[in-house]
Image (tube, grey):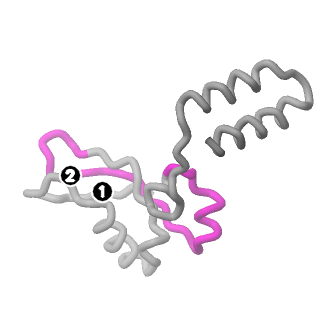
């Protein structure tokens, strides 16, 4: 859903505060509310963004993109070096056919182990 917030006199409203307000309005758990894409209108005092409310944690993990789950505190970001990611990509480019996906998976695991 689209969320419009009027906040005169304040720069922006924190997402954590909005989660509680939106969750309370819709009788949902504030942890199951995902807020994203907020833009402040020129001149301030008004912001517009998006909100998704899930029924349970399993459906949230299933449908929500991983980067938004990391921002919400559900997952931790796995740090990988830039070089390892590029090596995995180039190694996958060299292999053709059915073994390609297997080689990409092995390269990704090797990059994650570093």
Residue 58 as seen in the image, left or right of residue 13: right
| Distance in Å between CA atoms under marks 1 and 2 | 7 Å
Q: Nearer the viewer, residue 63 or 41?
A: 63
Q: Quadrant of the C terminus?
A: top right
Q: Is residue 56 magenta?
A: yes
Residues at discs 1 and 2 in contact (Cβ within 8 Å): yes
Report which quarter residue 107 is drawn in: top right
Instruction: Report the residue that reaches farthest toward the left.
Output: 9
Instruction: Answer with mark 1 or mark 2, whichever residue precedes in sequence.
Output: 1
Q: Residue at x 49, y 56 (%)?
A: 70
Report the span colored magenta.
Answer: 40-67
Residue 49 as seen in the image, left or right of residue 111: left
Give the total of numbered labels: 2
Percent position (x, y) of residue 27? 43, 81
In terms of secondary structure, where does tag 1 sit?
A: strand
Q: Which mark is residue 46?
A: 2
Circle 2 Cα neighbour tier, 10 Å, few/some/many (<14 / 14–19 / ≥20) = some
Percent position (x, y) of residue 39? 29, 45
Report which quarter residue 113 is drawn in: top right
Q: Is residue 54 magenta?
A: yes
Circle 1 Cα neighbour tier, 10 Å, few/some/many (<14 / 14–19 / ≥20) = some
Position of 61 relative to 55 (above/below): above
Q: Nearer the viewer, residue 110 or 67?
A: 110
Q: Quadrant of the N terminus?
A: bottom left
Percent position (x, y) of residue 32? 49, 70
Q: Residue at x 55, y 49 (%)?
A: 78
| Residue picked out by circle 1 | 4
Q: Nearer the viewer, residue 51 or 86?
A: 86
In terms of secondary structure, where does tag 2 sit?
A: strand
């Amino acid at each position: 859903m689209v969320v419009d917030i009027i906040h005169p006199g304040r720069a922006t409203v924190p997402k954590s505060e909005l989660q509680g307000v939106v969750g309370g309005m819709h009788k949902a758990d504030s942890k199951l509310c995902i807020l994203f894409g907020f833009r402040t209108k020129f001149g301030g005092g008004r912001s517009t963004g998006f909100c998704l409310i899930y029924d349970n944690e399993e459906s949230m993990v299933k449908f929500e993109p991983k980067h938004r789950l990391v921002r919400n505190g559900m997952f931790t970001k796995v740090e990988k070096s830039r070089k390892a990611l590029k090596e995995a990509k180039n190694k996958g480019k060299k292999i053709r056919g059915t073994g390609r996906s297997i080689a990409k998976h092995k390269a990704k695991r090797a990059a994650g182990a570093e």
